[in-house]
Image: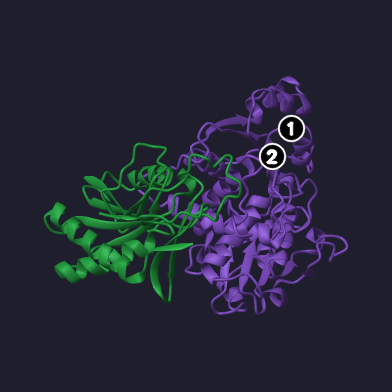
Chain colours: A green, B purple
């Protein structure tokens, strides 16, 4: 087990991402943060905090549950509980920053994009992730991420969100240590 | 946790408390889907649901149809009167025919008690009972439980009074089973000719007068007087029934001040329920209809999923 992002590094990275969001969107008008339940919710919360800090503006926040949009609903081993999606109003013409903790195969993101489209037609959807790891099975690339990890398929990334703050750990099968590349 | 898959839903007794709660929890998510601008999710895309209604029904059939369509399934409606049964085909052959068409779920409404069970035993598809004679109507009980939970906040510990023709009511039977399992204390009231015999055979207390049954009730569930099912007269007249067992504002005052009033519909206004109560602030009749679609989405979701997929929590 190796800590690749401690609480401080997570917040520092997310503050940078918040700055990039402001830069790319020329401000925050029409920006909505949507966390993918449940790992993406604290990421969306932290980004909202830093956006408020940077621009003095509260950005609408919501969450999306992808259970009903999974591409393996029919064969999923054990179907997790379906949670309610909470989307703040219509997404028509909004700039949606879709937030997740770890982007791996890309299938979750695909499902989340489909789910979002059922709430209106956003002007643009961008993807922000805490950890961008290797292993994509779909052509999906995050627009913003705090860290990039080149991992073996069986390695596992865990994001903790407790009293000590948001942290990212890697459980690696081999003895080698992971060299994170900060972006 | 019980991870046994729910294959068919024939009786409310197919559901233990955790299984029923899982369906109600899932229905919360589907409730949200029905309030979105685009009321459709792709979950059951490519699945086929056949609504097989051998008995007249508007709201239940429409509700199942919307539920299937909002989940992205292909829904086919087969009405009894237009089907081959009028040409003499037996139920057994009808089931075999539907089965050969590779239906994933068959929703059955039939006038004969036990029809859903009969179909379930002969079909590869999952079977959902949408009402079989005087036996059961489990999805009605689930939507009633959902409505109670949403309005009152809980089911456990509540006092629920069901009033009307208890003996011939599939709604009363399924509700008595399900709500008792979810921790409510259920009692029934109606004329003696309409109470089960023996009176406690449903496992709940029975009253032949309305007033004592209403005292302290959190939920009052009025049943429709089913004129079409009453061969012999079980009471002298509708007017007399209304006088003794009809729910008026004055009678409702006997229940708890915040008690809610339910009715599975369609209502006989002026018979079992007065206009004033039916349209009053404590009536949740339309909430029940809205809950119907969400609950049936949850039931179809569970029954149409492949064997491994159940509503079990990953941690469970």
Contact between marks 2 and 1 (CB within 8 A): the answer is yes
Residue B205 at x, y percent in the picture: 79, 71
Looking at the rendered structure, the secondary structure element under dot 1 is: loop
Q: Which residue is mark 1?
A: B123
Q: Check the image and report above or below for A166 versus A177.
A: below
Q: Are marks 2 and 1 on the same chain?
A: yes
Q: Residue furthest left?
A: A26
What is the secondary structure assignment of the residue under circle 2? strand
Quarter location, residue B132:
top right
How far across and down, in percent of the image, does residue B72 sit? 48, 37
Can see residue B164? no
Residue sitting nearer the eye, B210 or A96: A96
Vertical relation: B272 (above or below) B71: below
Badge 2 is on which residue? B127
x and y, in percent, of residue B42 in the image: 46, 39
Image point (32%, 65%), residue name:
A10
Q: Which mark is residue B255?
A: none
In front of the other: B120 or B312:
B312
Q: Residues within 10 Å of mark 2 (few under 14, many from 20)?
A: many
Q: Residue furthest front?
A: A176
Question: Could you tell me how far apart the alpha carbons at marks 2 and 1 are, in whole angstroms?
Answer: 8 Å
Task: Residue B254: name its quadrant.
Answer: bottom right
């Amino acid at each position: 087990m190796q800590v690749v992002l401690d609480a401080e590094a997570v917040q520092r990275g997310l503050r940078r991402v918040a700055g990039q969001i402001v830069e790319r969107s020329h401000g925050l008008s029409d920006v909505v943060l949507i966390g993918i339940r449940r790992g993406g919710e604290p990421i969306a919360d932290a980004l909202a905090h830093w956006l408020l800090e940077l621009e003095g503006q509260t950005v609408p926040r919501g969450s999306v549950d992808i259970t009903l949009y999974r591409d393996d609903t029919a064969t999923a081993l054990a179907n997790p509980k379906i949670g309610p999606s909470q989307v703040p109003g219509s997404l028509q013409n909004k700039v949606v920053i879709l937030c997740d903790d770890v982007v791996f195969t890309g299938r979750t993101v695909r499902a989340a994009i489909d789910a979002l489209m059922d709430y209106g037609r956003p002007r643009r959807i961008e993807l922000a992730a805490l950890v961008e790891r290797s292993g994509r099975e779909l052509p999906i690339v995050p627009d913003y991420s705090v860290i990039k990890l080149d991992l073996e398929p069986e390695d596992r990334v865990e994001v903790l969100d407790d009293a000590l703050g948001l942290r990212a750990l890697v459980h690696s099968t081999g003895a080698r240590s992971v060299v994170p590349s900060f972006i | 946790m019980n991870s046994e898959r729910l294959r068919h839903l024939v009786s409310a007794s197919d559901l233990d408390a955790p299984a029923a709660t899982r369906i109600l929890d899932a229905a919360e998510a589907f409730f949200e889907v029905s309030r979105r601008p685009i009321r459709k999710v792709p979950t059951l895309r490519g699945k086929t649901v056949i609504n097989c209604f051998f008995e007249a029904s508007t709201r239940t059939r429409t509700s199942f149809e919307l539920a299937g369509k909002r989940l992205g399934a292909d829904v086919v409606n087969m009405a009894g009167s237009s089907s081959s049964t009028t040409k003499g085909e037996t139920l057994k052959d009808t089931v075999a025919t539907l089965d050969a068409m590779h239906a994933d779920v068959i929703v059955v409404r039939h006038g004969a008690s036990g029809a859903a069970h009969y179909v379930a035993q002969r079909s590869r598809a999952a079977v959902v009972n949408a009402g079989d004679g005087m036996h059961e109507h489990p999805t009605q009980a689930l939507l009633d439980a959902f409505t109670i939970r949403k309005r009152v906040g809980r089911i456990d510990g509540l006092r629920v009074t069901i009033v009307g023709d208890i003996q011939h009511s599939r709604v009363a039977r399924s509700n008595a089973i399900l709500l008792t399992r979810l921790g409510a204390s259920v009692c029934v009231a109606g004329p003696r000719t309409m109470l089960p015999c023996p009176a406690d055979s449903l496992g709940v207390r029975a009253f032949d007068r309305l007033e004592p049954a209403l005292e302290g009730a959190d939920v009052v569930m009025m049943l429709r007087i089913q004129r079409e099912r009453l061969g012999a007269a079980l009471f002298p007249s509708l007017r007399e029934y209304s006088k003794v067992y009809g729910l008026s504002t004055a009678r409702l005052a006997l229940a708890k001040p915040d008690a809610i009033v339910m009715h599975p519909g369609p209502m006989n206004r002026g018979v079992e329920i007065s206009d004033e109560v039916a349209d009053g602030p404590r009536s949740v009749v339309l909430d029940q209809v809205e809950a119907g679609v969400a609950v049936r989405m949850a039931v179809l979701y569970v029954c149409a999923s492949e064997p491994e997929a159940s509503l079990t929590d990953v941690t469970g």
